[in-house]
Amino acid sequence: MLTYLTSLSIRIDRESRIDDAHQADVILVMGAAEYRGHPSPILKARLDHALELYQKKLAPYILTTGGAGGDPSFTEGGVARSYLIDRGVPAESIIVEDQGDSTAMSLSGATEILRRMGLRSTIVVSDGYHIFRVRRMLQEEGLTAWGSPRQSAEIGPLKLWWLCFKQAIGYGLWRVGVRI
């Protein structure tokens, strides 16, 4: 098991550095914390990157994800929508999934929305180490998914290894049916 997780962590680390954004139906932004109606630094960085991709006309829509978390007055997806509108993205170009409280739940809701709208391809925007798992979950649902990691501050090698290892555990659990 440890060998599998270590090998998977190495694959996740390698993929975390690749930006393979292609023309797609939608840019899917994975949620992160919000603070009283304002995006956390991580969410802001993801949104700024998604905005850059949108301005390059790589997709006509941006789908924001994330539920209420610790603050019932706001959702990550809703705060992200407001942030993007404030930066000039038309409201009709933003789709919101605001019920998910985990990666699996957010992607389940997002996948349902995409199916109903007839959208089949996505550019996933998140932290690099998170994209491996998200892409495979979307591909399992029959969607085409490319990754485009947000710019992030330098992470020390030990912390990056730990983050990749945690994603390997999450991916492994998902493969055996545990939805986290």
Image (cartoon, rainbow, N blue to C red):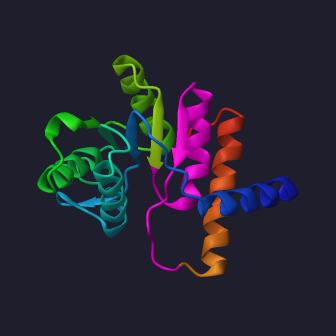
Q: In this view, does 177 lie above or below 14?
A: above
The answer to whether any part of residue 98 appears in the image is no
Judge left or right: residue 59 versus residue 4: left
Q: Residue at x 12, y 55 (%)?
A: 86
Q: Residue at x 65, y 57 (%)?
A: 15
139 drawn magenta? yes
Q: Estimate the x, y position of residue 55 in percent, counting from the top left.
A: 28, 52
Q: Estimate the x, y position of residue 68 in percent, counting from the top left.
A: 28, 46
Q: Estimate the x, y position of residue 139 in percent, counting from the top left.
A: 60, 32
150 drawn magenta? yes
Judge left or right: residue 32 versus residue 94: right
Specify the segment rendered in magenta: 125-154
Judge left or right: residue 143 versus residue 66: right
Q: Which residue is drawn at 18% across and 47% down?
A: 89
Q: In which quarter of the image is residue 90?
A: top left
- Number of numbered discs on residues: 0
The answer to whether any part of residue 8 appears in the image is yes
Q: Estimate the x, y position of residue 5 in percent, counting from the top left.
A: 78, 56
Q: Which residue is drawn at 55% across and 55% down?
A: 130
Q: In this view, does 163 lie above or below 143?
A: below
Q: Is residue 124 above or below residue 119?
A: below
Q: In which quarter of the image is the C terminus?
A: top right
Between residues 123 and 97, which one lies in front from this camera angle? 123
Between residues 153 and 120, which one lies in front from this camera angle? 120
Judge left or right: residue 125 versus residue 35: right
Q: Is residue 42 above or below residue 156?
A: above
